[in-house]
Image (cartoon, rainbow, N blue to C red):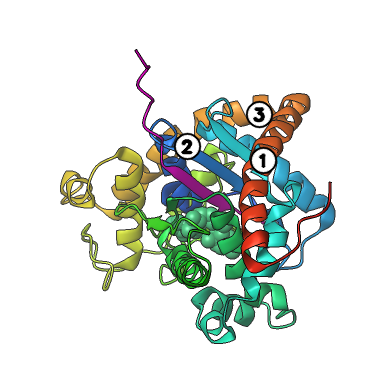
Amino acid sequence: MQEPTAPQKQIIFSGIQPSGTPTLGNYIGAMRHWQRMQQDYRCIYCVVDLHTLTVRQSPAALRKQSLEMLALLLAVGLDPAQTVLFLQSHVSGHAELNWVLSCYTYMGELSRMTQFKEKSARHADNINAGLFAYPVLMAADILLYQAHLVPVGADQKQHVEICRDVALRFNGLYPGAFTVPEPYIAPNGARVYSLQDPAHKMSKSDAEDTYISLLDRPDVVRRKIKRAVTDSDGEIRYDPQTKPGVSNLLTILAALQGNSVADCAAALAGMGYGALKDAVAQTVVDTLSPMQARFDALMADKPYLEQVLAQGADQADRIARRTLEKVYKKVGLCPRPR
Ligand code: AQP
């Protein structure tokens, strides 16, 4: 009798830029879901170092941050025995598919991207073509692996949508080229805001006191949360419109405790903002401390980190080559004689 074949797992792809130490926003909006999804999906996660070049970086800092990012992903619980983990620049297919897709992406659709508008305002002295074409490289990242789902924070939804549009356009011309991916955006904590300016999302490349980094030690966490902007009415209530600072703290608390914001607000009803901040700080410290201990141990074992990177690059490259060969053939490029 023939053995029944196991159903194929759906493929997940996502990436994170080594543009600094990841923040609580990166963790709540993306990384914690990546960890949770490993059992049920075929997961491919990438440190997207090429994307980071869209903003000027110090070469030495970028190298350091890339390795630290890998160590943090492992510390969060990503397991290289079941998940592909690699650096984007180690798999040349990303840059190659990027070129092909850039010939199927319109200037008009790229110019509507919110992130381009925000980042070009912030880096007015360096509005480069890479910053403008960022979503094309992101589409290449995703489509190379024929991903079904892309777990991201809400800020990246627009980029996954443009990736879908490009995939559908390309498939319309060359049927069967790509799996058309869906964004996966968790309802709770999809957007964590700056501690100092809760109208803006928390970002790892903003000023230090606006974010909590996953490597902030307990005293720093407590100090930053104590200084977080709230309001003057004194009531602990979730209302992002009129109480963005308090609502942001409740979002962080709820996401890390696995409760709803309503339950968190109810548990603190009648107390002052000091109690809310103490609860958030303690929950953040309890979440980060074990992660930081694992990170410290991993950073002391560079040969292991390099082995993970080499294995991940080989695994990713094999998948990427298959898609790239298919795409090159479909668009009419001649195969290289062997
Ligand atoms: N504040 C946030 N709340 C929820 N999710 C967030 N993400 C980022 N910020 C928040 C999600 O984290 C994943 C990795 O993001 P990224 O590093 O690739 O790029 P980003 O979105 O541009 O993140 P940053 O921290 O703001 O980086 P910089 O400062 O370099 O631009 C993504 O899934 C993102 O949605």
Q: Is residue 241 above or below residue 76?
A: below
Q: Mark 3, mark 2: which one is toward the viewer?
A: 2
Q: Amino acid at mark 2?
A: Arg
Look at label 3 and name its amino acid: Asp
Q: Which residue is mark 3?
A: 296
- Tell me the residue at 60%/60% (across/down): 140
* Label number found at residue 318: 1
In the image, the residue with mark 3 has its CB under 8 Å from the nearest atom of ligand 1 = no
Seen as rendered, the residue at the extreme top is 1
Q: Which mark sits nearer the N-terminus, 2 or 1?
A: 2
C-alpha span from label 1 to label 3: 31 Å
CB within 8 Å, label 1 to label 3: no
Q: Earlier in the sequence, mark 1 or mark 3?
A: 3
Q: Residue at x 43, y 68 (%)?
A: 161
Left or right relative to 313: residue 164: left
Residue 223 visible in the picture: no
Please say if 144 is above or below 8. below
For the magenta stretch, what is the residue range? 1-19
Residue 27 lies, in percent from the top left, at: 48, 46
Residue name at image x 36 percent, y 50 percent: 252
**Picture quarter containing residue 281?**
top left
Q: Position of residue 111 (x, y in %)?
A: 55, 84
Badge number at residue 95: none
Q: Residue at x 16, y 51 (%)?
A: 270
Disc assigned to residue 42: 2
Name the residue nearer the viewer: 251 or 59: 59
The answer to whether the residue labelled 3 contacts the one labelled 2, judged by CB atoms less than 8 Å apart, is no
- Quadrant of residue 5 within the rendered picture: top left
Q: Secondary structure at mark 1?
A: helix
